[in-house]
Amino acid sequence: MKTWKISEKLRMTHYRCMLFLILAITAVHITAWNSRVFTDWYRLHIFPIWTNLLGRISDLYSGSVGEILIFAGICLVLLEIVLLPLFAVRRSRFWKYRTWNIRLLCWIFVYIYGTETLNCFVMYHASTVEEQYFEQKDDYGREELMAAYTQVVTKANELSNQVKRSADGTPVYDGSEEELYEQCMKAMQAQGKVYPYLAGHYPDPKPIRASHFMSQQHLLGIYFPFTMEANYNTVMYPVNVPATICHEYSHLKGIILEDEANYFGFAACIEAEDIYLQYSGYLSVLGYLARQVRTSVPEEIRQTMVTANEQVCKDDVFLTQEQWKQVEKKAVFSTETVNKATNVFLETNLTMNGVEDGIHSYSRVVRLVVRYYAEKGD
């Protein structure tokens, strides 16, 4: 009887702790929705704790811990499907299994809910970089757009002849993978001198093993809030890597909006000393600017503007045709199905967190790039 009472007390304490954590996390989330001052303070002072703690733990392993956890989660689900009918045959074992199983699943839920909320969802409600650091906040005009586009194309054309290339003409980094990571870290830390929330420690970026599947989703990189890792696609055209790493690094510092992450990936790279990073930065926004120019500038004017040279056009790709063939060869599901599912997930996640234009928000980087050049007066 005494043992039963102790067991019951422990069980109740267990569930009370769990309930307390859920309520506390929810309270933080609700506060973030209703107070931008709180969210800005949280991003600057509290969020770095999670980055330094989880990020340093994950950094002990060279691969992506988040990818392993996702794989383990899939295996756990499959195991549940197999074991549940087996335990159901013997009622005594079924109840013991069910009790242990419920507790485990509850704690997994609390961990995912907590890390997703504290390391991701809350930051959707922080002040934007434009609100905090740009003097001009009104909309831009055609002339400003054309000026920014011209700057980006001119620099891309120039750098396309300076980067090192392999025998087949593919841009390659003139150094080791570790040196490239270090340059990306330095580029982001340099941004931290202007934007305080970007200062501090950066863990190594993590290559994704399932990059072929990632390519089917048209993803260059991904941020895992539950492990605080910046992950990148190893299959994509290599010159995309630096801007992608810097993009994902900005997520590690609480920049959750995709247009802002695109902007910091661009700004960090083009202001770096390394020309490979610079070239990657210009290419990362060239497509967005080009599409906006085609939409906003009459054809007769576009014909007078500078255009990307042949080499830049070849380099401004996600995957080459040969890389796509390799992706399709290893595909388990059709790329169209995988891409549609990913778009639905991204759209849902963004709109649920207050980003009304969903995945189209990525293209808002054009406004930030235009403002970047307008502020600098270049």
Image (cartoon, grey):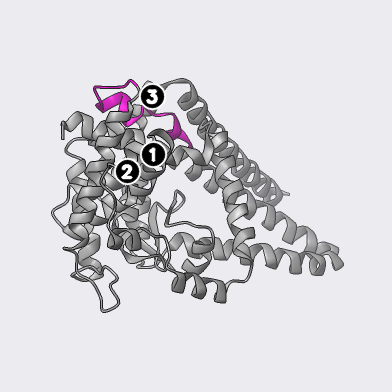
Earlier in the chain: of badge 1 and badge 3, it is 3
Pointer 1 local density, CA inside 10 Å: few below 14, some 14–19, many at least 20:
few
What residue is drawn where x is 27% and y is 51%? Answer: 281
Q: Which residues are magenta?
A: 121-138
Residue found at the far left of this picture: 273
Label at residue 303: 2
Residue found at the far front of this picture: 300
Closer to the observer: label 2 or label 3? 2
Q: CA distance from mark 2 to mark 1?
A: 6 Å
Q: Is residue 245 visible?
A: yes
What residue is drawn where x is 18% and y is 70%? Answer: 175
Q: Is residue 336 above or below residue 173?
A: above
Residue 101 lies in quadrant: bottom right
Residue 299 position within the rendered picture, expressed as x and y whole percent measured from the top left: 39, 39
Which amino acid type corresponds to the residue marked 1 in the rendered image? Answer: Glu
Does the CB distance between marks 2 and 1 fall below 8 Å?
yes
Q: Secondary structure at mark 2?
A: loop
Q: CA distance from mark 1 to mark 3?
A: 47 Å
Q: Is residue 117 visible?
A: no
Indicate yes or no whether the magenta region holds residue 296: no
Does the CB distance between marks 1 and 3 fall below 8 Å?
no
Residue at label 3? 38
Which amino acid type corresponds to the residue marked 2 in the rendered image? Answer: Gln
Q: Secondary structure at mark 3?
A: helix
Residue 251 lies in quadrant: top left
Q: Secondary structure at mark 1?
A: helix
Residue at label 1? 299
* Pick the front one: 234 or 69: 234
Residue 311 position within the rendered picture, expressed as x and y whole percent measured from the top left: 28, 63
* Pick the front one: 37 or 372: 372
Earlier in the chain: of badge 2 and badge 3, it is 3
Residue found at the far bottom of this picture: 167
